[in-house]
Amino acid sequence: MLSAFLLSNAGAALLPTFDSFIQTQGRSYVNGSAEYLKRQTLYETVKASAELHNRRSDRLWSAGVSSLWDWTEAELQKLRGWDGSLRPQGGQARTIHPHSTFLQQKSEPSTKLSELPKQKMWTNLAMARHVKNQGACGSCWAIAAATVLEAHTEIYTGHARTFSAQQIVSCTPNPRSCGGDGGCQGATAELAMDWVLHHGCAEESSVPYRGQDEECTVKADLEMAQMFSDGDAAPSGAAAFGMTGWETLPKNKYAPLVRSLAERGPVAVSVAADTWQMYGSGIFNNCEKDAIIDHAVTAIGYGEENGIKYWEIQNSWGSGWGESGHIRLQRHDADEYCGMNTKPQLGVACKGENDPVPVCGMCGVLFDSVVPHFKSRSPQ
């Protein structure tokens, strides 16, 4: 019986009042002001939904308070990398593939899924101990790419180094409005990977994260980028830490993602995060099969608890959200949990790509997965 593995009501903590919330979160709302009343209404609405959910005896996850509970829907959309006020409207559908697979696997992998470990976690890496907080900037795509690059660099070299998400936000061009209008208005992990491939990337200490659009600190040589776009060796910037390319895994396929996590390292994935605001702990299963992809995160492993399989996801909303900044998404075997994304322009699609597309996995986690290529690997 599945219910034997579900969370008990005892696991649901008493949720704080709005006044306790604003004190804990350091809010400066003036009691009785219009702003106070607006934020109080938002908070109380989420709190009521959370309490209702936590009373369910059949739940796999519990709701838990976070700093997002008094945010408006527009603020949450921007956090996930989507700002409708800055997005082009309409336009004819056209064939645009700037984020197609950069490097294809030349042959079918020899390792069978049955031979992979039952669980694989990359929590031993330095990047897993430092959960970034994107703030009000829609930079999830840049943070996911930076986090994955930090992981693979440590796997390749044996030494940890950081990658400046701020520099990626400020410098990555997005002429076709893929995943947003660029910078804090959204882009894709593919664009971030490609920019780092051709230009390298500063460490976080050199260009710290500010969570806003700023002037690029690197004089981008677009002609050089064009020169290397055919798959030749990367310029010295990326070569210095071993990166030789990047790859988009086959869309909506279970095997490539689980195999990459088992054998190579963390993966940047795109998800539908519109129902994540209330998540506190447990294995999240609150996404319908039809999912609108609107957020980029880092898959850092997979596992199983009480017979229920899950993906371990590192988010970019700070360590105070979820399970110390992480969420576990229910993991379905093969490609069996599939639906449609009716608004692809809200996620990784580019301007004009409006046709609905299939998505698979809880919260569409199998739809768009990106990994870097390095000279050689010795997985830990």
Image (cartoon, rainbow, N blue to C red):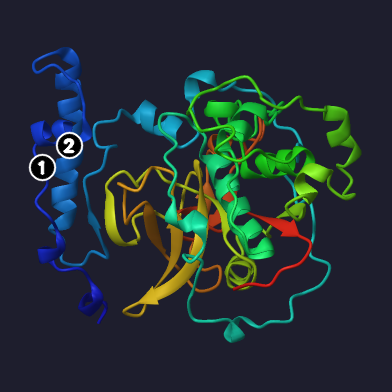
- Residue 303 on image: x %, y %: 44, 73
Q: Residues within 10 Å of mark 2 (few under 14, many from 20)?
A: few
Asked whether residue 367 is in view, the answer is no
Residue bearing the label numbered 2: 24
CB-based contact (under 8 Å), mark 2 and mark 1: yes
Which one is earlier in the sequence, the residue at label 2 or at label 1?
1
Label 2 or label 1, whichever lies nearer to me, is: 2
The quadrant where residue 49 appears: top left
Q: Which quadrant of the figure has residue 136? A: top left
- Residue 264 visible in this rendered orientation of the protein: yes
In terms of secondary structure, where does tag 1 sit? loop
Disc 1 crowd rating (10 Å Cα; few below 14, some 14-19, many 20+) is few
Q: Residue at x 40, y 54 (%)?
A: 288
Q: Is residue 10 above or below residue 354?
A: below
Front-most of 126 and 221? 126
- Residue projecting furthest to the top: 33
Placement of the C terminus among the 4 image quadrants = bottom right
The quadrant holding residue 106 is: bottom right
Amino acid type at mark 1: Pro
Q: Is residue 294 above or below residue 288?
A: above
Label number found at residue 287:
none
Image spot of residue 139 (x, y percent): 52, 35
Residue 277 coordinates in the image, percent (x, y): 31, 43
Quarter of the image with the N terminus is bottom left
Q: Which residue is mark 1?
A: 16
**Could you tell me how far apart the alpha carbons at marks 2 and 1 are, in whole angstroms?**
10 Å
Query: Is 10 placed left or right of 192 in the picture?
Result: left
User: Which kind of residue does numbered mark 2 sit on?
Assistant: Thr
- Local secondary structure at mark 2: helix
Q: Name the residue: 50% across, 34% down.
A: 81
